[in-house]
Image (tube, grey):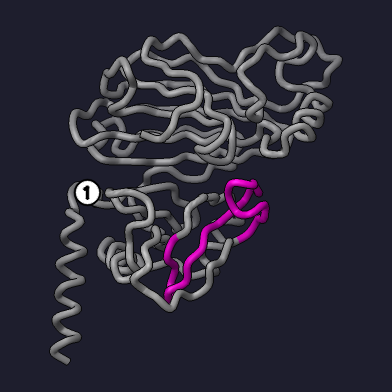
Amino acid sequence: MVIFICLFVLLWEEAHGWGYKNGIFHNSIWLEQAAGVYHREARSGKYKLTYAEAKAVCEYEGGHLATYKQLEAARKIGFHVCAAGWMAKGRVGYPIVKPGLNCGFGKTGIIDYGIRLNRSERWDAYCYNPHAKECGGVFTDPKAIFKSPGFPNEYGDNQICYWHIRLKYGQRIHLSFLDFDLEDDPACLADYVEVYDSYDDVHGFVGRFCGDELPEDIISTGGRGRKKMNASCPVPCDDEIATSLIENPALNSGNVMTLKFLSDASVTAGGFQIKYVAVDPVPKSSPGKNTTTTSTGNKNFLAGRFSHL
């Protein structure tokens, strides 16, 4: 009994040690959320939480480790995370919507590592709390507006949020920046928003944005590059999509997009509002103007692929 009490006290102190302030745990990170399920990783990096630590993090903020069924329910509405995490009863796995060679072994569903006998193994965590603080999410409506945490007030330090847009096959995503004010940094290494033309932040990098200049609009292409479209088709036509997908199965039809917001440990700003609308496919024979998905109007914009910093 004494041992049990001591263990409980240690875990409780460990949970408090993550430092709860203004709805944010300083030593862990809010990530994307769907159906009350969200992904956690330690502030020190990926795969740093034991089972006891993962459980303590979820419970301290009013939730608990997600069950397999809860994680699967979230996956079915678009929750896609390429990171293994603890679930209830010591189970480990991660949800995959879009199969890929680098994540999920080319399969969809819950990639299940089973119940772990060694609870000291270190993974991320999948928590369940339908009333958790909003930071990121999965969007499937034809249009929506999402905001930085706390907007119109300033966002907090040490945050990472992911927004996943999932539309009907064949549709494109037209992204517009309504308000934009992040810490000004010519190298965009402090606070920034990254846009990916894909299911995750591994493929389809479009660009990184910071500062207070309003970025230009972006239209998804499915990761086929930031090129001008066919003059007779303002978005990629069906035959172009089919050819691209056959040549590179990792690409998508342009109906998905991922946005990542990161803030560092100092200096905050007003935040942002970003709107998207679904763009229905246009027949190839329909007239239209050339359209480019590149957004280079912002001086604090970095295009190309970056390693995670």
Residue type at mark 1: give it.
His
Viewport quadrant of the C terminus: top left
The answer to which quarter of the image holds residue 4 is: bottom left
Dot 1: within a 10 Å radius of its alpha carbon, few (fewer than 14), some, or many (20 or more) residues?
some
Magenta span contains residue 272: no
Give the x, y percent position of residue 205.
53, 28
For the image, the number of numbered tags is: 1
Between 192 and 286, the residue placed more toward the observer is 192
In the visual, does 193 lie left or right of 44? Answer: right
Between 202 and 29, the residue placed more toward the observer is 202
Magenta span contains residue 107: yes
Between 214 and 239, the residue placed more toward the observer is 239
- Taking the view exactly as shown, the residue that stands out farthest to the bottom is 1
Report the residue at 19% width, 54% height from top.
Answer: 20
Report the residue at 29% width, 62% height from top.
Answer: 57
Viewport quadrant of the N terminus: bottom left
In the visual, does 20 lie left or right of 294? Answer: left
The answer to which quarter of the image holds residue 244 is: top right
Give the x, y percent position of residue 108.
65, 55
- Taking the view exactly as shown, the residue that stands out farthest to the right is 285
Seen in the picture, residue 243 relative to 68 is either above or below; the reply is above
Q: Which residue is mark 1?
A: 26
Q: What element does badge 1 sit on? A: loop
Seen in the picture, residue 258 relative to 67 is either above or below; the reply is above
Q: Which residues are magenta?
A: 85-109
Report the residue at 47% width, 22% height from top.
Answer: 207
Seen in the picture, residue 208 relative to 57 is either above or below; the reply is above
Report the residue at 30% width, 71% height from top.
Answer: 52
Give the x, y percent position of residue 285.
86, 15
